[in-house]
Image (cartoon, grey):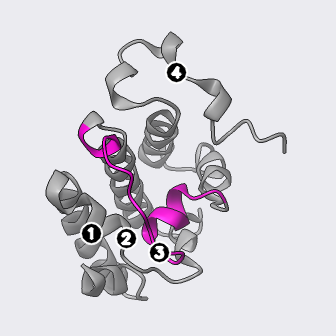
Amino acid sequence: MPALMEILQSDCILAQVQAVRLLSYVAQKNDLLYDILNCQVHANFLNLFQSTQPGSLLFEVLVFAERLSEGRNTPHYRAVKWHYNEQSLHEALFGDQSRLADRLLALVIHPEEEVQIQACKVIVSLQCPQDVRVQPSFCQTSRSYFNNGE
């Protein structure tokens, strides 16, 4: 996993897209989700979510984020109290100091429609645990990443 994470954070777009596609696939495997989320990432990891990135990479990174969010919201995963290192992917994306919400909101107005739609899907996955997503009125806005008073 660490080698794939390094490729994802490299400067080669084609390699990044291939790595993130593989990581997205692996992220759907409950047994490997913690290993992915606890991988160490660079401090600038969220730069992958900047609107200046190529649309193909942005789309795949957003799919990856959605799958991670959905995976960590499953009852199976939530049943365990996980501990992540400070430089982990989990902390970069979902930690208290993460700026992912800001990046996602900026992508809602991205010129490419598929990027806009995928950014919205990630926002929804962050708002609602998977088991209540069929009933949006049950989403808890009090723990929202988007209601922090800024």
Q: Identify the residue under disc 2.
A: 38
**Is residue 118 shown left or right of residue 93?**
left
- Whole-Å distance between the Cαs marked 3 and 4? 28 Å
Expressed as whole percent of the image width and height from the top left, the position of residue 45 reads 52, 75
- Whole-Å distance between the Cαs marked 4 and 1? 28 Å
Give the number of the mark in front: 4 or 2.
2
Q: What residue is at 45 percent from the left and 63 percent from the top?
A: 90
Q: Identify the residue under disc 3.
A: 85
- How crowded pointer 4 is (Cα within 10 Å; few <14, some 14-19, many 20+) is rated as some
Q: Are marks 2 and 1 in contact (CB under 8 Å)?
A: yes
- Whole-Å distance between the Cαs marked 4 and 2? 26 Å
Q: Which residues are magenta?
A: 76-96
Vertical comparison of 68 with 56: above or below? above
- How crowded pointer 1 is (Cα within 10 Å; few <14, some 14-19, many 20+) is rated as some
Q: Judging from the image, what secondary structure is the residue with disc 1 in?
A: helix
Expressed as whole percent of the image width and height from the top left, the position of residue 91 reads 52, 65
The quarter of the displayed image where residue 1 is located: bottom left
Q: Earlier in the sequence, mark 3 or mark 2?
A: 2
Q: Are marks 3 and 2 in contact (CB under 8 Å)?
A: yes
Expressed as whole percent of the image width and height from the top left, the position of residue 99 reads 66, 59
- Whole-Å distance between the Cαs marked 3 and 2? 6 Å
- How crowded pointer 3 is (Cα within 10 Å; few <14, some 14-19, many 20+) is rated as few
Q: Identify the residue under disc 1.
A: 35
Q: Judging from the image, what secondary structure is the residue with disc 4 in?
A: loop
Expressed as whole percent of the image width and height from the top left, the position of residue 50 reads 59, 65
